[in-house]
Image (cartoon, rainbow, N blue to C red):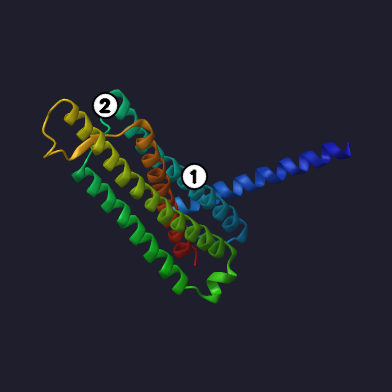
Amino acid sequence: MTRLLRLSANNGARHRRGMASTRALGFVLAGRSITSKNDMIPLMIGWTCVFYIVVFCVVGAPFLFVLRFWRYAHAKGWSWSSEDSRDAYVDVAKTLITASGIAVVLLASSASPERTADRVAAFSAKVAVVCLIACVGMSLVAMLALIRGHEEAKGRNIDERRAKGLSTFDVTEGKLTSGELLITLIPSAIALSSFLVGLLFLARIVFHI
């Protein structure tokens, strides 16, 4: 009997929390102010859940984008690397490295006692720094893999043309192997995902304080 009463009390508490969260969200959507602490806490929990859902989507989006490259490379043979495409992707990697470095420096220089005392802000700052540093590292790996992969693909193309007695003077491209393409795409997806997640947690710090 005692166990049944305890279960009933727990279910009632969950129901009240759910109703309070729904009521608080309704106040916001309707433009009404929230004056009760019991309404504010469920609202904060609700927005936290929404934030992490967005983070989950942002983490997966770059991998879906990279998967498109992989699918087209095998379905249509679009795995050729030219000097122009190599330079363009290297510039993107350099931009990610520069932006991540600037964000980490600004975050470190703007640290304040209020921010470090707040648990949510402190946790968000740590996650942002880790993600941005991971972006720098993975961008370097992707950039080096792309440069080396392009040189090897170009060299293979030159060897094939020489074997056929063709001119190699104007050769500026080559076909990447599956391994070369994979070792470039995976770090690229991780770098882009880390950068976007880092920006989200930086924005969370700004809106939380």
Task: Categorize mark 2 by other alpha carbons within 10 Å: few (<14), some (14-19), many (20+).
Answer: few
Give left or right: position of 200 versus 96.
right
* Quadrant of residue 82 within the rendered picture: top left
Instruction: Looking at this view, name the residue that lies furthest to the bottom.
Output: 113
CA–CA distance between discs 1 and 2?
35 Å
Q: Secondary structure at mark 2?
A: loop
Q: Can residue 193 be seen in this snapshot?
A: yes
Return the x and y of residue 119 as percentages of the image width and height: 59, 64
From the viewer's side, name the closer residue of 202 and 101: 101
State the residue position of label 1: 53
Tag in front: 1 or 2: 2
Residue at the (47%, 70%) spot, across then down: 108
Image height of 21 relative to 109, above or below? above
Residue at the (12%, 29%) spot, across then down: 166
Image height of 117 relative to 158, above or below? below
Return the x and y of residue 143 as percentages of the image width and height: 33, 49
* Quadrant of residue 19 within the rendered picture: top right
* Quadrant of residue 200 within the rendered picture: bottom left
Q: Quadrant of the N terminus?
A: top right
State the residue position of label 2: 77
